[in-house]
């Protein structure tokens, strides 16, 4: 049924980069066979899923939205991919994304943009716009995203779906193409809080193949999603998340959610986190710095595309020509910014300062979580903007992640879930819930209450 749905609508939405029809049917038949033989089934047996094209899938194309990996067939599965297969999930295909997960609109995909199912002329968020659009257009009931600065939560917000960035280290990064390794985190996307929890439980857990994977039990997310009791919970509202640049309808829906939580017995506490004002600036130094190092591996020798290898050019020239042709403008911009920020003479002024700001933001969160159990905010300052509107204005694009980025810098857990439509444009608004590291279950408890 999902393959038929994809056939019917994805020409318009363009959520998928690759539909693995044969692979999906084979997985589904294998589940049927297991069931018929009375064998034990995985926890999500037979449930279809859309996988962001940043996770390696053995023998199935993985492009990361980039020309440089066009045609590359990974020889191995990411840990997330393997865990999904072990849970008997049916992987329908790979979803569209901003190239190397750099962007907030999916317009930076080398394979063309994805439309927001609520209004196809608008962006579905990014970088995981394909996964969110697949959910919102009923082309998959579950999806996987990655969140470096908001790429799970912001697409969830603008498509009225649920997206969770787990605690940093909670879900393995092995086989997840690296953008900014100290920020990148894979996580679940779904249409309901409980669905997200069921998927979270399947993909989370310690992985010796990822050196930053945390070796602690997976938080009781499913139990929390079934509970939803917020009475007596202390919920923080951060004064720095609001004010100029926030759309009136977004603020209105956010304030209604806060009142709803108060009505359910939560205690609302106003807080200030002064360093959050500098989060965006710090992120746009740290993320490009790490990407300039991570993307060095795309040298035309190891993977994918190779341009100009005609026997007359040096390896260096072939690398340069391949990168020129294979990387899009945003990726080049970030590699240049990152290389500059890390270069001797500028390192302390840029990268060093950004790391200090990162510490201040972490401390702001620590202080806040001495007073509250979770924090809530709008997920994004505005609803989905029209495709093309911010394409030539990187700074305007970067503002989409104003509320999501501090969470990645500190390594906390956060969720976005729908909280109604903005009255002025009828488009979805997302509520963000933030929990301290390793307390991911609190997101699901509060999410279940709001939902
Ligand atoms: N929009 C942010 C960026 O462009 C975040 C991306 C992400 O989370 N992968 O870097």
Image (tube, rainbow, N blue to C red):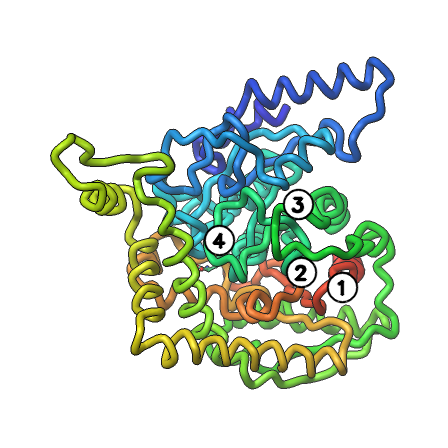
Position of 292 with respect to 199 (left or right) is left
Q: Earlier in the sequence, mark 2 or mark 4?
A: 4
Q: Which mark is residue 190?
A: 3
CA–CA distance between discs 2 and 3? 18 Å
What's the CA distance linking mark 1 and mark 4? 26 Å
**Disc 4 element:** loop
Q: CA distance from mark 2 to mark 1?
A: 8 Å
Residue ID at (37%, 38%)? 302
Which residue is label 1 attached to? Answer: 439
Q: Check if mark 1's residue and mark 3's residue have beta carbons within 8 Å.
A: no
Do tag 2 and tag 1 residues touch (Cβ < 8 Å)? yes
Identify the image quadrant of the N terminus: top right
Rendered position, 152 above or below 432: above
Mark 3 surroundings: few (<14), some (14-19) or many (≥20) residues within 10 A: many
Residue at (72% x, 27% y) in the render: 46
Residue 192 in view of the camera: no
- C-alpha distance separating marks 2 and 4: 21 Å
Q: Are marks 1 and 4 in contact (CB under 8 Å)?
A: no
Estimate the x, y position of residue 181 in percent, counting from the top left: 51, 57
The label on residue 167 is 2
- For the residue pair 150 and 246, the one nearer the viewer reads as 150
Q: Alpha carbon of mark 4 to alpha carbon of mark 3: how far?
A: 15 Å
Q: Which residue is mark 4?
A: 125
Q: Is residue 413 above or below residue 14?
A: below
């Amino acid at each position: 049924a999902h393959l038929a749905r994809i056939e019917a609508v994805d020409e318009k939405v363009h959520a998928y980069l690759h539909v693995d029809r044969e692979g999906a049917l084979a997985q589904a038949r294998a589940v049927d066979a297991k069931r018929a033989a009375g064998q034990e089934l995985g926890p999500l047996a037979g449930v279809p899923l859309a996988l962001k094209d940043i996770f390696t899938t053995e023998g199935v194309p993985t492009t990361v939205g980039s020309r440089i990996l066009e045609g590359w067939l990974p020889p191995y599965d990411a840990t997330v991919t393997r865990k999904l297969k072990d849970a008997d999930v049916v992987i329908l295909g790979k979803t569209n994304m901003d190239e190397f997960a750099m962007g907030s609109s999916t317009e930076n995909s080398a394979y063309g943009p994805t439309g927001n199912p609520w209004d196809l002329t608008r962006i579905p968020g990014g970088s995981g716009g394909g996964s969110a659009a697949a959910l919102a257009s009923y082309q998959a009931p579950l999806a996987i995203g990655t969140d470096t600065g908001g790429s799970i939560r912001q697409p969830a917000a603008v498509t009225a779906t649920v997206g969770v960035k787990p605690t940093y280290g909670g879900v393995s990064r092995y086989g997840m193409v690296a953008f900014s390794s100290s920020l990148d985190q894979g996580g679940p996307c779904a249409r309901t809080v409980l669905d997200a929890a069921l998927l979270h439980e399947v993909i989370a857990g310690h992985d010796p193949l990822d050196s930053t994977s945390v070796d602690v039990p997976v938080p009781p997310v499913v139990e929390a999603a079934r509970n939803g009791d917020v009475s007596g919970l202390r919920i923080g509202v951060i004064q720095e998340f609001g004010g100029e640049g926030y759309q009136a309808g977004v603020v209105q829906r956010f304030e209604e959610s806060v009142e709803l939580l108060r009505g359910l017995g939560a205690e609302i506490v106003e807080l200030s986190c002064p360093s959050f004002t500098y989060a965006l600036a710090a992120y746009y130094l740290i993320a490009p710095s790490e990407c300039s190092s991570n993307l060095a591996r795309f040298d035309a020798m190891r993977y994918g595309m190779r341009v100009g290898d005609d026997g007359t050019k040096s390896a260096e020239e072939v690398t340069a020509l391949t990168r020129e042709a294979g990387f899009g403008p945003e990726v080049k911009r970030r590699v240049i910014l990152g290389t500059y920020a890390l270069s001797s003479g500028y390192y302390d002024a840029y990268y060093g300062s950004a790391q200090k700001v990162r510490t201040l933001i972490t401390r702001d969160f620590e202080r806040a979580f001495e007073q509250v159990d979770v924090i809530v905010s709008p997920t994004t300052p505005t609803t989905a903007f029209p495709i093309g509107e911010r394409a030539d204005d990187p700074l305007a694009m970067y503002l989409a992640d104003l509320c999501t980025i501090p969470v990645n810098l500190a390594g906390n857990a956060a969720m976005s879930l729908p909280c109604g439509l903005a009255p002025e444009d009828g488009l979805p608004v997302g509520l963000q819930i933030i929990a301290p590291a390793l307390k991911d279950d609190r997101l699901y408890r509060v999410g279940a209450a709001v939902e």
